[in-house]
Amino acid sequence: MANLTKCNLGYSLKNIPIPTRNAYLKSLIHQTENFIKRIRWRLFWFERHENKDQDIINDESHENFGLKTSNSPPSNAELYNFEGELYNMISNIKFSDHPNDFQEKMAQDLKTLKSGNKVVVEADKTTNLYQVSPEKYKETLLNNITKDYKLGNEDERKLVDDSTRSLASKLGIDDRLEKYSENQCFLTYKDHKENFYTAHPCRLINPAKSDLGNVSKSIIERTVSDIRKKTCVNQWKSTSDVLEWFRSVQNLKKARFIKFDIVEFYPSISSGLLDRALTYAKSITDLTSDEEEIIKLTKRSFLFNGKQCWVKKSEENFDVTMGSLDGAETSELIGVYLLNKITSIIPKEHLGLYRDDGLAIIGNSNGPKMDSIRKKLHATFKREGLKITVDIHDDSVNYLDVELFLNDNSYRPYKKPNDTPLYINAKSNHPPNIIKNIPDMISKRLSSISSTEQHFNDTKREYDVALESSGYDQPLSYQTPQLTPKKRRRTRNVIWFNPPYSTNVKTELGRRFFSILDRHFPVGHRLHKIFNRNTVKLSYSGG
């Protein structure tokens, strides 16, 4: 650890400092301009529908995969006065100073971190920060890059760009795709690993991405959802899914847990493994050749470090990157394929997978049987080019953020030993409704992963202390989880205004905004049906 200096600020990194007046006004102007663009587009489409312009109506219903157009909406005389009054509202914003000790501490901590002439690196799964010299950071970053990457060339990038434009043109979204982003790669430290103090293991994050990843994400989400419905495999998306499964597995005699973890899952996904997963997907659900090509093309990725462009060392440029737009969805596609393979070893109703973490309950277990399953799991994943670690647990197991007990089918909250709970401080620059609801939200969360009130009480002490140190005086209390059926929500096309929040803003911005809205689009106005308090909402954005 001679090259690293550990720094734990003792509070959540999600706390928001109070912005300066100029920074606040700049952000408010930006958000107001975005809102005005949205209402101009809404009026544009509204008038085209009124005029029954079928070409425009067809264009509006065209799938755009959430990608925003680069075109600017036309201005409209009916909005001039409304827009003008919004800008007048900004020019008349009043401020007042509300200094507090926590905000001063954050400002001082930030100043200290910046003055150290060190690179500040976040931990991968804890709240720790580490300071390292720029030279050492660059060396470590380059070592992590060259382990799996080689220098790329401009011709390869051009080929990917041309293929992307061709597919985007087929989809009719070529006017919405931006150039491949050259966001710089960076590291996080895996300080939760046992060998951290000797080996300093890192995770290489590649945030460079193509907008085509949004298209791939949408396609894979639809595909995986359909596979899960048709095969009934347990691919979990949350702790609540795990608990629902655990409660359903009953009356297994001499049962034991098997937990397995896929080692370096994302980097280990090969083009061959993806091809096999796609072949399996096509045997279950519909997937066109163009959709398959889009999924594969987004894996031809690039990593940027300074002015250098890098590609994966494999024979072809193929990489499922941490931080890519469809990385999580790709891992889920591989996951449902792997679950199908594993069900030949473990019954699917006794098995589940969350990303790269698997869990199973084996009935009538004994030493030879568990060892046989362990060997079969290793062999199955090896055939797919993956490595796993397998642990066998007798009565209890820690999985995600819960601890499960087989003897009485109970469960309680769990956290890693070196992970201290930290919450948003009561003096953070968050909207008051968020600050007010923090204790209740935590109570509900801990209650939902506690099978009994006793389990809740046994584990809540550390969370109470964390809340108290964050400025809250409301203790946590057990709340019986309500298993209410999901209601179908009416979809309403809402336009959101997202002004920044600041404790130092004296003006009641929300009240002023809705007063302007009501005045310009009253009941009986031609545009009231599209611009009213049900179709226009306000929600504060952070900082």
Image (tube, grey):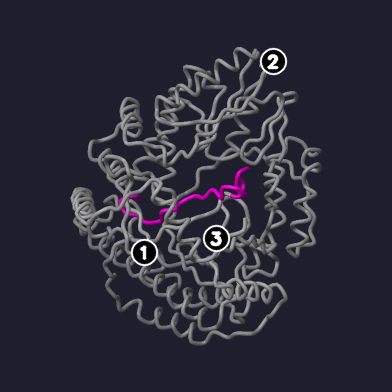
Residue placed under numbered mark 1 in the picture: 306
Upstream in the sequence, badge 3 or badge 2? 3
Q: Give the magenta range.
A: 191-214
Please state which amino acid type lies under the numbered disc 2: Lys
Q: Quadrant of the N terminus?
A: bottom right
Give the label on residue 254, or none: 2
Q: Quadrant of the C terminus?
A: bottom right
x then y, percent, for residue 165 = 20, 53
Q: Nearer the viewer, residue 5 or 236?
A: 5
| Residue at screen point 46% across, 79% down | 26
Label 1 to label 2: alpha-carbon separation: 57 Å
x then y, percent, for residue 514 = 51, 73
The correct choice, above or below, for 493 with respect to 24 in the image is: above
* Element assignment for label 2: loop
* Element assignment for label 1: loop
Upstream in the sequence, badge 1 or badge 2? 2
x then y, percent, for residue 518 = 48, 74
Please state which amino acid type lies under the numbered disc 1: Gly
Q: Is residue 502 visible?
A: yes
| Residue at screen point 52% across, 32% down | 353
| Residue at screen point 38% across, 44% down | 320
Residue placed under numbered mark 3 in the picture: 121
Q: Based on the displayed image, in which of its 4 quarters is residue 410 positioned?
A: top right
